[in-house]
Image (cartoon, helix red, strand yellow):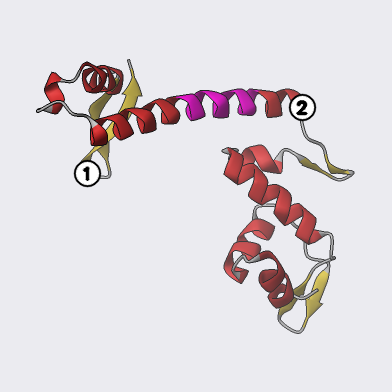
């Protein structure tokens, strides 16, 4: 498959495919003129990369899953990531529920609503602190 066919089949732009090849995530098997050629199994590799990215793995983590013998996925690492996702889902679900309550709350003022105040207290546990970033002040979220 040439790079255009892989791009079309995977939904990734050719620039991403070239980058993934540059950092060692995928390998072309040659060229047809200026166009890179890939084995059809590259689509499975790209699907694994996509799944890993959606799960929150870095490209470095994902690169570690590819060996000369094929993908070798650390089951402990998968379980750890699944637990992180469970925690994030619980946090986001609580925020969603609080926002829905606030939208429908009958209190004359949100600051008179105990449920809304609990949501604010929970949100207050994430503090924003200034950080330096290329000569500009940015904010960085921290858990406290």
**Residue 50 within the magenta-colored segment of the rendering:** no
Q: Is residue 95 above or below residue 71?
A: above
* Dot label at residue 135: 1
How many tags in the picture? 2
Relative to 133, 26 lies left or right: right
Of mark 1 and mark 2, the one earlier in the sequence is 2
Q: Is residue 69 above or below residue 109?
A: below
The spot of residue 34 in percent (x, y) is 71, 81
Image-quadrant location for residue 126: top left
Relative to 132, 52 lies left or right: right
Image point (72%, 79%), residue name: 35
Within 10 Å of disc 2 (Cα), the crowding (few <14, some 14-19, many 20+) is few
The spot of residue 117 in percent (x, y) is 21, 19
Q: Measure how far apart labels 1 and 2 are at the Cα level.
A: 42 Å
* Residue farthest toward the bottom in the current orientation of the protein: 33
Please say whether residue 49 is visible from this viewpoint: yes
Within 10 Å of disc 1 (Cα), the crowding (few <14, some 14-19, many 20+) is few
Image-quadrant location for residue 119: top left
* Dot label at residue 75: 2
For the N terminus, give its image quadrant: bottom right
Under circle 2, the secondary element is helix
Q: Nearer the viewer, mark 1 or mark 2?
A: 2
Which residues are the magenta region? 80-90
Image point (32%, 34%), residue name: 100
* Dot label at residue 25: none
């Amino acid at each position: 498959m040439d790079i255009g066919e892989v791009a079309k089949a995977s939904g990734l732009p050719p620039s991403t495919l070239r980058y993934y090849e540059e950092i060692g995530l995928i390998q072309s098997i040659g060229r047809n003129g200026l166009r890179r050629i890939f084995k059809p199994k590259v689509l499975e590799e790209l699907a694994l990369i996509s799944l890993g990215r959606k799960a929150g793995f870095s490209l470095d983590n994902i690169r570690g899953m590819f060996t000369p013998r094929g993908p070798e996925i650390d089951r402990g690492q998968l379980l750890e990531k699944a637990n992180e996702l469970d925690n994030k889902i619980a946090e986001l679900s609580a925020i969603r529920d609080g926002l829905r309550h606030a939208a429908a709350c009958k209190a004359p003022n949100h600051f008179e609503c105990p449920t809304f105040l609990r949501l604010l207290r929970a949100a207050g546990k994430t503090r924003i602190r200034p950080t330096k970033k290329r000569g500009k002040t940015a904010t960085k979220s921290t858990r406290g």
